[in-house]
Image (cartoon, rainbow, N blue to C red):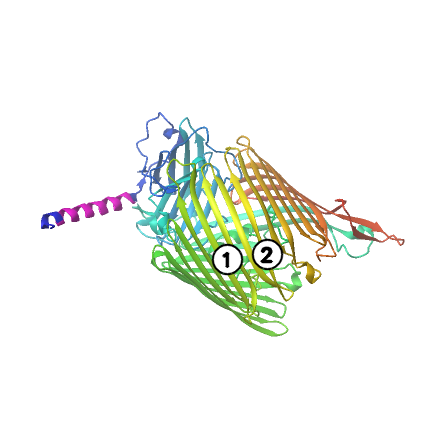
């Protein structure tokens, strides 16, 4: 029997435990008179009197959730009138410490430290700041239920240096780069973390457990800044100058004089981006004549074995800031549909639980006389613990045609493990005729440390038209179910975990007729030093040319970083695969092999070499259907954190059998040389040369007129461009 004294003692113990845990997850920042000096934190030196709040009790998030870190980390947080400061002192294994001078946001796979801030304490979104041991930056925006948005860029400064025991890193984050309430006291959510690639280990304060992986921001610690932060300069102005010289092949199918096959142009353009922040809550972004000459080519993807459109991510700076706010479960706005914008205005902001976003932009890709005017409105209301309700309206008007899409979407966090997402939308297109359609989507997800489940259902009318969205399949009813379970290894094992994932997809056409189904099983084994082994089994049936075509196969993949300077991915698979470019019913499928090689070699702190190779072959008893080869080489040298040079070579060769496949054989080589200076987002210099060679020849007829003919050699330079862009952020 429990006595009243015993019960009272138990209550005291529980209460004291709660108080300790609450205090453990709360920090009160200290205002300092001067900015921290990184040299004061070197090993063997006495710490200065003003170090701010001290955080030492990091905990593993992975691979061993909830256990003590392998290496010690200390973070010192402070602030002054203009900036938030974070100094990290990290112990590390000097034989495996990975730290290089790289391009901004190109330091994946290295040691890094991280700071996450939920300035509105809405437990749904956060600013995220990263830096490697040499101070190379990366930043992002995180929104619960969405992919982390690394396209977000803001102004902040870093310093980093290696020491005899590890490394030091200092963050200086201006308050003008953050958005927060105009309160007398700031109450924020905050987390600090580090990554150790040698052990595939992620350490964090406070403990953010993977048992609640659907609610990450709600696990942040509480931080108090006991001051009303001073108003910052609300205006930014970012002009640029771009000049270029271009020579491009005109229509390759026509006959013309040799000089008329190419169009030469010289271009000089001045434009600007500007930003105005109202009450530190709403941001107005204006752009005039944006230029994207500094944007690199897309990473290679295999397209010949794809039945539907493949997504290539947006890289243009105009569209990537705050893009996560405009995202919906099924994307009704995909900015790469806007090809050549002439100018635009974007508004984003938050007041309490209400968030607002709007975009006005035009597209002159079809000529100024056929200008497309695009407008978009996004609103969202947040509730606690990661739930929200949003609305999105997208409108495009061009000549006499109009496309309007409107939808509602929501996210509901049932508890720490279950989430529910949904979306309904309707479209209306007025062109030569009127067309209406609707879209319905819902998913339910469960996640804890070992078990994950995601069930999705979508229903999309064939008349649904989101001309600015990315909806690759219309007229379908689709169910997509994924479940996985993870087994974790013992502390001293070389392997870290084993995961088995099962996926089942069943799709019907709008008329309830069968379209396709797929079942695949994926076994993933993760080990130390970023070693990952995957083995996949796949079976699929789909309706082609009125027939059910069944295919099946396997694929094995190994990714390794056993050597600190070398990251490699090797994959090979064989399967019975569909021939989507078939010319006759007897060749609807064939025997496919797929090989993939990716290497990233980083000798020293400055050089990098990346090589990607894809080889896909589809054969039939009647002969080879096609062979597709893709190779990309990227040689880079980073002089320091600002100056860098890259030489990129993209080669693509498709050899197709016209008797068995309707795709045309072709080959091309793109060369991209770039010298750049990027002091910070907005202040940069780019000098870029681009050359495209294709497997074509110019052949003259008896009248002296030329036309192109396919060639086995890269004989014709079909496009050359030399450009320079200079921008400065005021």
Q: Which mark is residue 551?
A: 2
Q: Does the magenta-highlighted stretch encompass residue 20?
A: yes
Which residue does the image show at 14% across and 46% down from the upper left? 9
Local crowd at mark 2 within 10 Å, few (<14), some, or many (≥20)?
some
Q: Where is residue 631 shown, x and y percent of the image?
A: 64, 43
Q: Where on the picture, by quarter, is residue 453?
A: bottom left
The one nearer the camera, 295 or 514, is 514
Q: Where is residue 566 shown, x and y percent of the image?
A: 54, 35
Q: Which mark is residue 494?
A: none
Tell me which segment is drawn in magenta. 7-25
Give the main secondary structure, helix, strand or loop, of the magenta stretch. Answer: helix
> In the drawing, does residue 332 fall left or right of residue 222?
right
> In the drawing, does residue 5 fall left or right of residue 484?
left
Q: Where is residue 404 shown, x and y percent of the image?
A: 54, 68
Q: Earlier in the sequence, mark 2 or mark 1?
A: 1
Dots 2, 1 in contact, CB < 8 A: no
Q: Where is residue 659 shown, x and y percent of the image?
A: 74, 57
Q: Is residue 292 above or below residue 610?
A: below
Q: CA distance from mark 2 to mark 1?
A: 47 Å
The one nearer the camera, 206 or 416, is 416
Which residue does the image show at 82% across and 50% down from the upper left? 258
Local crowd at mark 1 within 10 Å, few (<14), some, or many (≥20)?
many
Q: Does the magenta-highlighted stretch encompass residue 415?
A: no
Q: Is residue 474 visible?
A: no
Residue that label 1 marks? 346
The one nearer the camera, 468 or 519, is 519
């Amino acid at each position: 029997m429990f006595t009243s004294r015993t019960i009272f003692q138990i209550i005291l113990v529980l209460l004291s435990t709660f108080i300790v845990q609450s205090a453990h997850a709360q920090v009160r920042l200290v205002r300092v008179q001067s900015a921290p000096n990184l040299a004061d934190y070197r090993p063997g030196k006495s710490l200065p009197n003003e170090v701010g709040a001290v955080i030492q009790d990091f905990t593993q998030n992975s691979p061993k959730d909830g256990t003590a870190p392998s290496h010690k980390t200390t973070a010192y947080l402070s602030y002054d009138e203009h900036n938030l400061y974070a100094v990290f002192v990290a112990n590390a294994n000097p034989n495996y410490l990975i730290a290089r001078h790289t391009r901004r946001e190109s330091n994946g796979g290295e040691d890094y430290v991280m700071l996450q801030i939920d300035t509105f304490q809405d437990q749904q979104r956060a600013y995220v700041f990263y830096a490697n041991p040499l101070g190379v930056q990366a930043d992002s925006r995180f929104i619960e239920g969405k992919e982390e948005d690394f396209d977000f860029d803001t102004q902040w400064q870093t310093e980093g240096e290696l020491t005899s025991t590890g490394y030091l890193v200092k963050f200086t984050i201006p308050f003008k780069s953050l958005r927060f309430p105009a309160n007398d006291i700031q109450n924020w959510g905050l987390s600090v973390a580090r990554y150790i690639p040698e052990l595939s280990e992620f350490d964090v304060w406070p403990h953010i457990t993977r048992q609640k992986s659907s609610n990450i921001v709600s696990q942040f610690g509480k931080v108090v800044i006991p001051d009303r932060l001073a108003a910052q300069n609300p205006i930014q102005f970012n002009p640029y100058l771009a000049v270029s010289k271009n020579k491009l092949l005109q229509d390759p199918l026509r006959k013309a004089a040799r000089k008329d096959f190419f169009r030469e142009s010289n271009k000089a353009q001045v434009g600007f981006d500007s930003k105005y922040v109202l009450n530190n809550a709403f941001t107005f972004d204006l752009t005039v004549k944006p230029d994207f000459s500094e944007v690199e080519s897309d990473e290679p993807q295999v397209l010949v074995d794809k039945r539907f459109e493949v997504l290539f991510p947006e890289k243009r700076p105009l569209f990537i800031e705050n893009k996560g706010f405009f995202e919906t479960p099924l994307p009704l706005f995909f900015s790469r549909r806007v090809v050549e914008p002439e100018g635009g205005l974007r508004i984003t902001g938050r007041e309490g639980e209400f968030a607002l976003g709007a975009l006005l932009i035009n597209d002159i890709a079809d000529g100024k006389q056929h200008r497309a005017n695009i407008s978009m409105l996004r609103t969202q209301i947040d509730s606690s613990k990661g739930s929200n309700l949003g609305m999105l309206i997208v409108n495009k008007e061009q000549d006499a045609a109009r496309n309007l899409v409107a939808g509602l979407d929501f996210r509901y966090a049932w508890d720490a493990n279950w989430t529910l997402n949904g979306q309904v939308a309707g479209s209306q297109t007025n062109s030569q005729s009127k067309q209406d359609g609707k879209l319905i989507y819902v998913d339910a997800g469960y996640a804890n440390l070992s078990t994950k489940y995601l069930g999705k259902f979508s229903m999309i009318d064939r008349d649904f038209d989101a001309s600015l969205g990315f909806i690759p399949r219309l007229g379908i009813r689709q169910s997509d179910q994924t479940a996985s379970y993870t087994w974790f290894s013992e502390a001293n094992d070389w392997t870290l975990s084993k995961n088995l994932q099962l996926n089942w997809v069943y799709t019907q056409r709008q008329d309830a007729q069968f379209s396709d189904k797929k079942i695949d099983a994926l076994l993933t084994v993760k080990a130390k030093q970023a070693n990952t082994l995957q083995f996949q089994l796949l079976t699929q049936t789909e309706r082609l040319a009125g027939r059910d075509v069944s295919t099946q196969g396997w694929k094995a993949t190994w990714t390794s970083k056993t050597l600190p300077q070398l990251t490699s991915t090797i994959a090979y698979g064989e399967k019975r695969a569909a021939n989507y470019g078939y010319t006759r019913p007897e060749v609807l499928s064939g025997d496919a092999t797929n090989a993939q090689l990716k290497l990233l070699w980083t000798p020293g702190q400055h050089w990098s070499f990346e090589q990607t190779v894809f080889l896909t072959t589809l054969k039939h008893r009647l002969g080879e259907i096609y062979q597709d080869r893709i190779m990309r080489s990227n040689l880079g040298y980073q002089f320091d954190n600002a100056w860098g040079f890259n030489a990129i070579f993209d080669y693509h060769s498709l050899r197709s059998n016209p008797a068995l496949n309707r795709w045309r054989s072709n080959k091309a080589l793109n060369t991209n040389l770039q010298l750049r200076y990027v002091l910070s987002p907005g202040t940069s210099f780019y000098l870029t040369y681009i050359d495209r060679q294709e497997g074509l020849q110019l052949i003259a007829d008896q009248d002296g007129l030329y036309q192109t003919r396919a060639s086995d050699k890269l004989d014709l330079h079909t496009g050359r461009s030399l450009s320079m862009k200079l921008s400065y952020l005021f």
